[in-house]
Image (cartoon, rainbow, N blue to C red):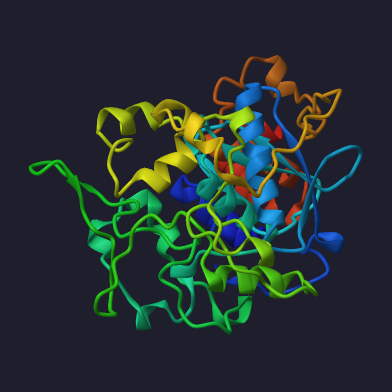
Amino acid sequence: MVLTPPQLARYIENGSLLVRGVSRKESAHNRWINNIVPYAVSPQYTSQQKQIIRSSLRGMEKISCFRFVERKSEKDYVFIVPLDGCYSYVGRIGGGQLMSLSPDCLADFIIWHEMMHAIGFEHEHQRPDRDNHLTVKYENVIPAQMVNFEKIRANEVDYPDKYDYSSLMHYDSYAFGKLDEKRKVRLATMVPKKAGVSLGDNMAFSPTDIRKLNRLGKCPSPISPVNPESGVQKKPQDVGKEDTTVPSAQCFDRTSNCHDFKEAGKCDSPAYKALMENYCALTCGYCKEMEKTTKLVEIPKSPQKEHTIKEEVKKPKVVIEEAEKDGNDVECEDLKISCKFFVEQCQKSNFRDVLKKHCRKTCGYC
């Protein structure tokens, strides 16, 4: 997302970079050319973690005409790094744009969610018309996370589809809720107005998500049925067959929470079996069973030579002032930990006032 100075100030002030599945209005600046999204995976990830990321992106390719290619020399690309949470910019912003996927974020539905942001989608619950469908309990929201519940202006987004409670881009009822110290539970932050609807973790693309994604990419082919557990498109001849997104030869867990799930008895629970087969096959011991199932998704082979991609975010050259020589730079510190994400804006005149106030050290304004 190309941040305006007011937006930048708001995000820095609120201490959050969780930028906001409605799509941003199309412009030549925020769409990926020919639906090709170059990406680079940080060498900080293990080989298994890299495999999870690549496999998830292959899953997105099977429901749309978007293609995710490992970056060679492309100027604009998504740099996936294990920082301090799960977040992404919205749309193509130019250059190497960061997407943070910490180890706890390495589950298909979270990777898909963040990549949907990078493609150009906002949160469903921030639609301009969301108050017709939800009640936001602002009193229960963690103050620093209020930005995640702001409505987007109608002139900024396209939202021709009906409100989608089951969207992958919709938060659950307790997202960013305050902790009730007495009961030790999270307080609800969103309550659906439609009877019979509950807001849980949406772990697969909804039919509306897929329609939006294909419309945004102007994809020519019709949409095929989707496996509700994996969110992966089936070929017409395979509809009705049992499938899995984890080939037995590459059996692994897709989230770091599998051991907790196993201790909680989820592996042996009939209600959770399909979910655990998809996300915790190794820990739950489903690998042998999966050898008998029909394989519809192949894990791509790793390239013979992996390229180490360094962050192409360089600090601007700084002219050393005489005051620094006198030792008067003791207060040269950033006021916000999020400053590192805005290095590329440091030398832009329309961002200078905001960054000079909050990011003096990172931007070299001391």
Residue 252 sits in quarter: top right
User: Quick check: can you spot residue 45?
Assistant: no
Judge from the rendering whether residue 268 lies leftward or rightward of residue 286; answer left or right: left
Q: Position of residue 168 (x, y in %)?
A: 50, 60
Q: Is 139 located above or below residue 159 in the figure?
A: above
Number of labels in the image equals 0
Using the image as rendered, state which of residue 298 and residue 14 is in the foreground.
Answer: 298
Nearer to me, 313 or 265: 265
Residue at figure coordinates x 50%, y 38% from the top left: 105
- Residue 172 is left or right of residue 126, and the answer is left
Residue placed most toward the observer, 183 or 288: 288
Q: Residue furthest left?
A: 182
**Vertical arrangement, residue 39 with respect to residue 24, above or below:** above
Residue 221 rendering spot, x and y as whole percentages: 77, 73
Left or right, 141 with respect to 313, comes to left
Which residue is depicted at the point 69% across and 53% down?
Answer: 351
Q: Quadrant of residue 245?
A: top right
Instruction: Give above or below for 201 relative to 317.
Output: below
> Where's residue 126, x and y in %?
46, 69
Residue 200, picture quadrant: bottom left
Residue 63 visible at all = yes
